[in-house]
Image (spheres, helix red, strand yellow):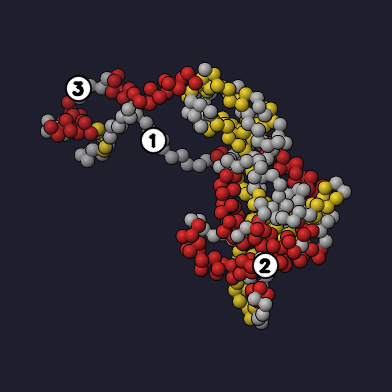
Amino acid sequence: MLLEIKIPTPGESITEVEIGRWLIEDGSMVEKDQEVAEIESDKATLTLIAEDSGEITFKVAEGDTVEVGSIACVIDTSKQVAISEEKETTKPTEPEVIEESKENPHVKVTGVAQQMMEEHDLSIDDILNGLKRIGKKEVETVLQQPSTPEPKTPTQETLSSREEKREKMTMLRKKLSQRLVAVKNETAMLTTFNEIDMSNVMALRKNYQNRFIEQHGFKLGFMSFFTKAVAIALKAHPKVNSMIDGDEIVSPNYADVGIAVQTPKGLMVPIVRNAESKSIAQIEREIKELAEKARNKKISVEELTGGTFTITNGGVFGSLLSTPIINPPQSGILGMHNIVERPIAVNGQVEIRPMMYIALSYDHRIIDGKDSVGFLVKVKELTENPEQLLYGGNPIEQLLDI
């Protein structure tokens, strides 16, 4: 029986995909639920799964652009019985161990041969002396042995190589390129900067890290603090959470924060929805799960669609300062950077503190300077006083009415 494996629907707006690469050979045997191919869309990289066991035959080649619902491959399920029988009858054989002789380190002796020599009280020299002549069999045996190539010293030719590598752009990379150019051409993008003293949030994270791991099973990072701070700051400055739709400005009452994740296939931005109503632990767990899905090509298009604001962290790669590019149709993006110890003035004294530059790129068509600067100052205030994040951004004194 031939089972047709069709291209699944990555999302409602996607009508065609590209076969990124086949993960197995054409005509090989596959098992049920085995990943057989990577599918590239303009939003994500997904995997094609074998629905049953059998022999696979490709119907499209790597790099082909195919419509959603078309046949990617067929599986001959009648071959799966042969696969299972072969597994049952085939027994793994232990490789024969070959060791160097202590008497003559240039001669290798198998375990069986060593045992026979010991039983008959023979040495390596006795065996070598007993060989009367070298024949075709002995020569072929030496030729079949794997040889260790001598290390090559780099020549002037290899040091000054002018070779080039070319590879086709994926649909995801093409779409990303188009969107980045469109942002430059279609928005009035500006960037404003500030800096954050990370001392308090680092101390809080250090003090509660072990208890957090015991309670939740994963580490507490900085991204959850910034995501929560952004969600609260967006509520205080709703224009930063807005977007243009035709002649209207849409301002959601919720914060769906996108977290930029670098994957082998390019940049992806999974969404933490309703971040304003989630705890730091919930946000940290969701960020971790979404990032793993994105890197393992398990993320759905729905988890990448939408978002009212984006955070990108160039600090993990060592970036000190940058101007992040807006993710349309959003109007703002926060850039985090590397934490560096620097001398700063604290109460009239010079102290060494762990400092981070932050940047807000925003669309000046709908976000004024007051809102952009006020938003960034609010994020700075909340991060430097992380206990406020636990109380919705309000000072403890205000909640206690003192």
Image check: 307 left or right of 52?
right
* Residue 148: assigned label: 1
Q: Name the amino acid, label 1.
A: Thr
Is there CB contact under 8 Å for labels 2 and 1?
no
Image check: 337 left or right of 107?
right
Q: Nearer the viewer, residue 128 or 80?
A: 80
Name the residue rendered at 58%, 22% in the picture. Answer: 4
| Residue located beneath label 3 in the image | 132
Name the residue rendered at 20%, 33% in the picture. Answer: 114
**Quadrant showing the C terminus:** bottom right
Earlier-in-chain disc, 3 versus 2: 3
Position of 373 relative to 257 (above/below): below
Camera-nearest label, 3 or 2: 2
Real-space Cα distance between discs 1 and 3? 29 Å
Q: Name the amino acid, label 2.
A: Gly
Neighbourhood count class around disc 2 (C-alpha, 10 Å): few under 14, some 14–19, many 20 upward: many
Position of 288 relative to 297 (above/below): below
Could you tell me residue 36's position as x and y percent? 54, 30
Q: Name the amino acid, label 3.
A: Lys
Position of 167 relative to 223 (above/below): above
Kindly indicate the quadrant of the structure image that contains residue 22.
Answer: top right
SS at mark 3 in the image: loop
| Residue located beneath label 2 in the image | 393
Viewer can see residue 113: yes
Earlier-in-chain disc, 2 versus 1: 1
